[in-house]
Image (cartoon, rainbow, N blue to C red):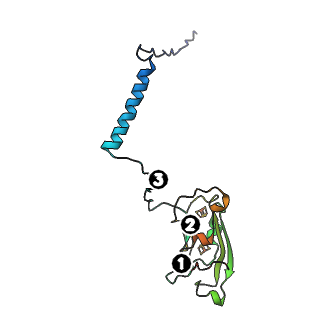
Amino acid sequence: MATINIINVVKRHQFSWYEKFYFYSITKGLFITMKHFIKSAFLRGTVTVEYPETKRAYSSRFRGMHSLKRDELGRERCTACFCCMWICPADAIYIEAGEVTAERQHLHPEDKFAAKFEIDLLRCIFCGLCEEACPKGAIYLDGGGEMAADNREDLILTKERMTEKSGGPILGQRN
Ligand code: SF4
Ligand code: SF4
């Protein structure tokens, strides 16, 4: 039985005489650029912002850097229960618990506090599980999203950086 070979012949685009001059393509490109420039400058306004002078508002669902909250009396909510540390899928949280002594009782609602609390932003995937797991409502991912740094240390969030300020000295700061 005879076989039929079907060959697709691709015809090359034949350039017209004016297409052979670069002038045509350059003019066409410039026309498109000018069209967009006039549209954005005079007709619909700019669609970009002049960052960092101007910043867009974050969405309410945005997950940024972590913050540690205080209760209505200004005490640290975190009781070093380790729930956030165990649930973190990226192993980004490190906590050391401290015992609340008589002198520190006004700083913490229970008998333990986070003597050390660090989050490695280089590991964090901003999944929000730590926020969901926290039984005390102590940790939220409600910080900013600008995390550029030129060394690894700046990308470790320490407790001092994360703890909500209360106007006075940072409660729980290690002496
Ligand atoms: S947001 Fe997710 S990855 Fe980041 S510290 Fe919390 S649990 Fe870990
Ligand atoms: S932030 Fe919340 S979950 Fe994490 S150790 Fe503190 S109290 Fe526990």
Quadrant (top left, top right, bottom left, bottom right) of the N terminus: top right
Mark 2 residue's CB less than 8 Å from ligand 1: yes
N-terminal of the pair, mark 1 or mark 3, is 3
**3D distance between C-alphas at marks 2 and 3:** 23 Å
**Residue holding disc 2:** 66
Q: Secondary structure at mark 3?
A: loop
Q: Where 51 falls versus 14 (above or below)?
A: below
Quadrant (top left, top right, bottom left, bottom right) of the C terminus: bottom right
- Residue 45: percent from left, percent from top: 34, 46
**3D distance between C-alphas at marks 1 and 3:** 32 Å
**Residue holding disc 1:** 70
**3D distance between C-alphas at marks 1 and 2:** 13 Å
Q: Secondary structure at mark 1?
A: loop
Query: Residue at the bottom extreme?
Result: 102
Asked which quadrant contains residue 121, the reply is: bottom right
**Residue holding disc 3:** 51
Q: Amino acid at mark 3?
A: Tyr
